[in-house]
Amino acid sequence: MNDLGYGVDHTSEGGREYARAASPHGCTIAIGVSETSRVDIQVTGVEETKACEMANDLVEAAEPRVPKG
């Protein structure tokens, strides 16, 4: 994942890797699937804090449907 302006935060939870990259006008959160694949959730067009809140809500909805590699 590329740094979009505010760095990239990496974390893991429940055996899954996540990465978050915020920018002045959006936020991307990656859900790790395998060593070579991921699902990206991206929200753009709003300021960083709101975008990351929205992206996190979408990750919570999508994550149970994402396979674990």
Image (tube, helix red, strand yellow):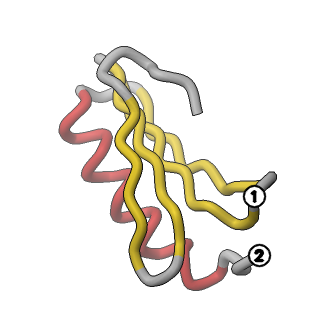
Q: Which residue is drawn at 75% across and 65% down?
A: 34
- In the picture, measured across the screen, residue 31 lies left or right of residue 9, that is right
The kind of secondary structure element at disc 2 is loop
Picture coordinates of residue 67, whole percent (x, y):
73, 79
The residue lying toward the viewer, choosing from 43 and 31, is: 31
- In the picture, measured across the screen, residue 64 lies left or right of residue 68, that is left
Picture coordinates of residue 57, whole percent (x, y):
35, 64
Q: How much space separates mark 1 and mark 2, taking CA atoms?
A: 8 Å
- In the picture, measured across the screen, residue 37 lies left or right of residue 28, that is right
Q: Name the residue under label 2.
A: 69
> Height in image: 5 above or below 18?
above
> Height in image: 57 above or below 15?
above
> Height in image: 50 above or below 30?
above
How busy is the neighbourhood of tag 2: few (under 14 within 10 Å), some, or many (20 plus)?
few
The residue lying toward the viewer, choosing from 60 and 13, is: 13
Q: Which of marks 1 and 2 is nearer the N terminus?
A: 1
Q: Which amino acid does label 2 sit on?
A: Gly
Q: Which amino acid does label 1 sit on?
A: Glu
Q: Quadrant of the C terminus?
A: bottom right
Picture quadrant of residue 43: top left
The dot on residue 54 is: none
Picture coordinates of residue 56, whole percent (x, y):
35, 59
Q: Residue at x 69, y 55 (%)?
A: 38
How busy is the neighbourhood of tag 1: few (under 14 within 10 Å), some, or many (20 plus)?
few
Q: Which residue is drawn at 46% across and 48% down?
A: 19
The dot on residue 35 is: 1
Q: Residue at x 35, y 22 (%)?
A: 23
Q: Are marks 1 and 2 in contact (CB under 8 Å)?
A: yes
